[in-house]
Image (cartoon, grey):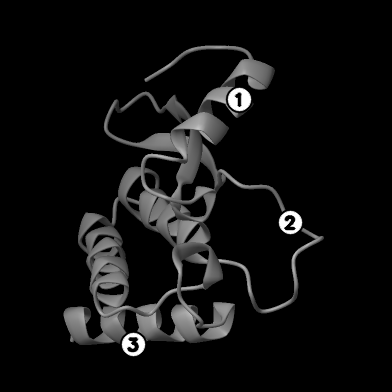
């Protein structure tokens, strides 16, 4: 956990994106603990911006998908479902289904659909 101003937080997250290989992989959450101390109230979003300059259906959806997994686990008390999404993302990436920022040729839709199919298998 790093506590800093928004500007420096943006700089740090941009630099840290080199570790996994793409800003398109990093989920983000701004959290506040609820009184029960077990549930977090939060705003969940990918670390990257809206990227309106990128071509349609070419943007990596993984950060958005992982942000949803964080929301399920931390705010909605659905840890099994959140972990299923995380596991599905790993399986999809391990299978080589990737967008261009990760050296692949798959579209946003193809990656998202592949993750959704894996989640269905995991939770079946």
Q: Can you tell which of label 2 and label 3 is closer to the viewer?
A: 2
Q: Which mark is residue 51?
A: 2
Name the residue at 56% across, 34% down: 14
Name the residue at 26% across, 80% down: 95
* Alpha carbon distance from label 2 to label 3: 26 Å
Residue on which the image places disc 3: 117
Q: Position of residue 51 (x, y in %)?
A: 73, 56
Q: Position of residue 79 (x, y in %)?
A: 23, 55
Q: Residues within 10 Å of mark 2 (few under 14, many from 20)?
A: few
Q: Earlier in the sequence, mark 3 or mark 1?
A: 1
Q: Can you tell which of label 3 and label 1 is closer to the viewer?
A: 1
Name the residue at 49% across, 86% down: 110
Q: Which mark is residue 11?
A: 1
Q: Helix, strand or loop at disc 2?
A: loop
From the viewer's side, name the closer residue of 88 and 75. Answer: 88
Q: Helix, strand or loop at disc 3?
A: helix
Q: Earlier in the sequence, mark 2 or mark 3?
A: 2
Tell me if residue 39 comes above or below residue 51 in the rendering: above
* Alpha carbon distance from label 3 to label 1: 35 Å
Q: Residues within 10 Å of mark 1 (few under 14, many from 20)?
A: few
Q: Residues within 10 Å of mark 3 (few under 14, many from 20)?
A: few
Q: Helix, strand or loop at disc 1?
A: helix
Determine which quarter of the picture holds residue 81: bottom left
Residue lying at the far front of the rendered structure? 103
Tell me if residue 100 comes above or below residue 120 in the rendering: above
Determine which quarter of the picture holds residue 53: bottom right
Q: Position of residue 80 (x, y in %)?
A: 20, 62
């Amino acid at each position: 956990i790093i506590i800093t101003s928004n500007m420096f937080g943006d700089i740090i997250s941009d630099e840290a994106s080199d570790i996994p290989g793409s800003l398109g992989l990093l989920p983000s959450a701004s959290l506040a603990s609820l009184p029960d101390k077990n549930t977090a109230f939060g705003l969940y979003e990918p670390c990257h911006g809206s990227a309106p300059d990128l071509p349609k259906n070419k943007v990596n959806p993984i950060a958005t998908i992982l942000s949803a997994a964080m929301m399920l686990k931390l705010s909605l008390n659905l840890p099994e479902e959140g972990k299923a999404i995380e596991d599905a993302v790993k399986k999809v990436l391990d299978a080589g289904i990737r967008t261009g920022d990760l050296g692949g040729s798959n579209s946003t839709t193809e990656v998202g659909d592949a993750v959704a199919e894996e989640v269905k298998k995991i939770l079946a």
